Amino acid sequence: MAVRDIIKLPDKRLRLVSEPIKHIDGDIRALVDDMFETMYKAPGIGLAAIQIGIPKRVIILDLSKKEGDHKPQVFINAEVTWASSEKSKYEEGCLSIPEYYEEVERPAEVKVKYLDLDGKAHETEVKGLLATCLQHEIDHINGVLFIDYISKLKRDRVIKKFSKAAKKVEE
């Protein structure tokens, strides 16, 4: 297991649409292990493989509150199959856009189909924080960022801020 670098805005890879997983093998299991180690160190509650520069449809989540009480969840090839018309708002943040938070409105409930780490197909209906986090991470594997849901003015401001910071690092 290894902690990987999390790519940050304005890295263009964050806009890539990730490739579906055809076979769950040792490489995918190792990727998932690295993703959990990376996410816990960050710290965060969700991570998509593209955030560590791997354009594969792999998502991990752990919404547990306590340090020693991890409840890791893996979603492979996840996709939303239904979304409620009822909306909910949560303040979202992102490991690829560090220390920036904004309220985002999303469907309050969604149905998601996915494969687990054993390749078994599942479909689950979720609401609340889990629904928000899953939609946020599924957006990542589709090349969408949470800042795409905020006003153009705020989005332009945050992109400019991170672009400026990236230029300073390059100099």
Image (cartoon, grey):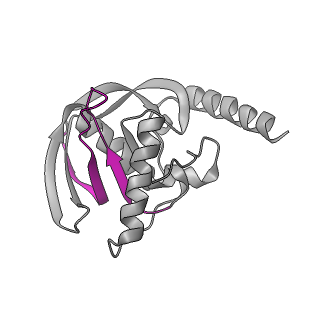
Point out the residue furthest to the right here: 171
Residue 79 among magenta residues = yes
Q: Quadrant of residue 62?
A: top left
Is residue 86 in view? Answer: no
Residue plotted at (36% across, 52% down)? 59
Is 134 on the left-hand or right-hand side of 102?
Answer: left
Observer-nearest residue: 20 or 148? 20
Say above or below: 169 vs 123.
Answer: above
Query: Which quarter of the picture shows residue 110?
Result: top left
Residue in the picture at 32% in, 71% down: 24
Find residue 7 and report its horizontal and vertical position in percent.
59, 46
Judge by depth and name the residue closer to the eye, 13 or 39. Answer: 39
**Is 162 in front, or is 29?**
29
Q: Position of residue 1 (x, y in %)?
A: 45, 54
Range of residues picked out in magenta: 55-84
- For the point 48% across and 60% down, the residue is 17
